[in-house]
Amino acid sequence: MSRKAELERRTRETTVQVSIDLDGSGQADVITGIAFFDHMLALFSVHGFFDLGIHAQGDLDVDSHHTVEDVGLVL
């Protein structure tokens, strides 16, 4: 049984694409435009031994919380 998922969320503020493989090896491909958030999500994947792909675009010129919130909702 495969424990994988892919999901996308589009709003007026953000576009978020997430892929996850719970039986992966800890590979992370995270691009949100928020360096510390990218770092924390990558460590989450590495130390959890699951593969995580997150590509997010948001209105970072307004505030980063829209991107962080929507990534959390999709994840």
Image (cartoon, helix red, strand yellow):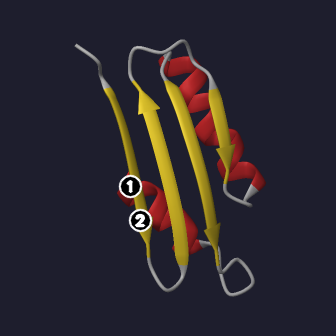
Q: Which quarter of the picture shows residue 25? A: top right
Please state which of the two labelled residues, at mark 1 or mark 2, is closer to the viewer: 2
Within 10 Å of disc 1 (Cα), the crowding (few <14, some 14-19, many 20+) is: some
Name which residue type carries label 1. Answer: Val
Q: Which quarter of the picture shows residue 53? A: top right
Residue 5 appears at what percent x and percent y? 35, 36
Dot placed on the residue nearer the N-terminal end, 1 or 2 = 2
Q: Residue at x 62, y 22 (%)?
A: 27
Q: Which quarter of the picture shows residue 41? A: top right
Q: Residue at x 44, y 79 (%)?
A: 11
Q: Secondary structure at mark 2?
A: strand
Q: In screen coordinates, is 36 left or right of 10?
A: right
Residue that carries the numbered disc 2 in the rendered image: 9
Residue 28 appears at what percent x and percent y? 63, 30
Residue 4 appears at what percent x and percent y? 35, 28
Q: Tell me the number on the disc at residue 23.
A: none
Q: Secondary structure at mark 1?
A: helix
Q: In screen coordinates, is 73 left or right of 28?
A: left
Res 54 visible: yes
Q: Tell me the number on the disc at residue 74.
A: 1
Name which residue type carries label 2. Answer: Arg
- Of 21 and 33, which appears nearest the observer? 21
